[in-house]
Image (cartoon, helix red, strand yellow):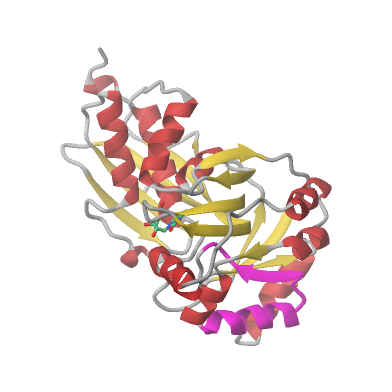
Amino acid sequence: MTSALELPPAVTARAPAKVNLELGVGPRRDDGYHDLATVYQAVGLHDDVTAAPADEWGCTVTGRDAGSVPTDEGNLALVAARLLAERSGARQPVHLSIHKQIPVAGGMAGGSADAAAALVACQELWSVAMERDELDRLAAEVGSDVPFLLHGGTAVGSGRGELVTPVLAQGTYHWVFVPVPGEGLSTPEVYAAFDARHEGRRVSEPTPGAEVMSAVRSGDPSALAAALSNDLQPDAVALQPRIGEIIGAALEFGALAAIVSGSGPTVAALASGQEAAIDLAVSLTASGAAEDVLRATGPVHGAQVLPTPRLT
Ligand code: C5P
């Protein structure tokens, strides 16, 4: 039995954001979720979560949009850490220090990234040896995107998104993400708008498109641009019309394609390469079309422990 004194003082793990290259949404299921056929890509915007032994459970949040993140029982990183403690028998409470780079409520799975990072950090802190499948199942209990953020890379998501199958992908893709100013969008609200739009019509089961798969295999950004799709986009745009304007501006300034990331409202614009991404980012901000842009490449790896804990 390891005594508390022998535990490392703190462990930091880093998890990426995601963009859905394709988001096919099926009918609403009896449990309220929707079956998905999605292709995830992990991108190089990261949140860091530092887990330190503490007398009681808690968390603090710093960085981008920190004020909008709950620090109570509902915080997804805390939910994940407590669930891992319960399942693994680890008794030591932790304080989680979350440092955010990923926009909050932006459709890039920031909360799920925090949960994935918390799982990886606490697993290391408590020396929990858990089979990958078991950790994936636990992650899925926290949120549909959490298993993918443990894996990273490019992957097909099925079920409600929690069943992850890696995809062989080539190349590096250059993205410009435009967070839409304001409140963000609530994922359930966007799915509810999708349901309302399809009221009285049959929604067919989604199937992963061959086009996206062959595009990511080719490594050609133009092929990927032509294949990007998101069934939730009309709903996100209807809820926040500013998204449509930003998509228009991104296309006007040379993006190969621009779509809503996940349930939005962040706009994901794909550029042909690094220089094009820099030009696009500059044009979007200099013209006033965007207040803020974030550049990132994908795919990147999933949640992992950093060699030294982050000093917060
Ligand atoms: O799984 P997660 O907690 O991230 O999902 C948040 C909400 O998004 C769900 O409560 C549900 O309203 C909606 N959702 C959905 N179908 C999915 C994933 C999420 O309806 N496949």
User: Which quadrant does the N terminus fall into?
Assistant: top left
Is residue 250 on the magenta stretch?
Answer: yes
* Residue pictured at 48% horizontal, 72% vertical: 200
| 250 relative to 51 in the view: left or right | right
Looking at the picture, tell me which residue is in the foreground, 200 or 280. Answer: 200
Residue 33, image quadrant = bottom left
- Residue 245 is situated, as x and y percent measured from the top left of the image, at 60, 85
Q: Position of residue 25 (x, y in %)?
A: 55, 59
Q: Residue at x 36, y 63 (%)?
A: 66
Q: In which quarter of the image is residue 153?
A: top right
User: In this view, which residue lies farthest toward the left?
Assistant: 55
Q: Nearer the viewer, residue 233 or 277?
A: 233
Q: For the view shown, which residue lies furthest in the bottom direction?
A: 287
Above or below, 289 against 225 in this view is below
Query: In this view of the protein, which residue sits in the foreground, 201 or 86?
Result: 201
240 lies left or right of 66: right
Q: Which of 169 and 163 is in front in this view?
A: 163
Residue 287 percent location from the top left of the image: 65, 87
Q: Give the range drawn in magenta.
A: 241-262
Q: Whole-percent x and y of residue 290?
A: 58, 80
Q: Residue lying furthest top in this view? A: 1
Question: From the viewer's perspective, is 81 left or right of 258?
Answer: left
**What residue is at 50 percent from the left and 59 percent from the top?**
27
Q: If the picture is divided into quarters, which one holds ligand 1?
A: bottom left
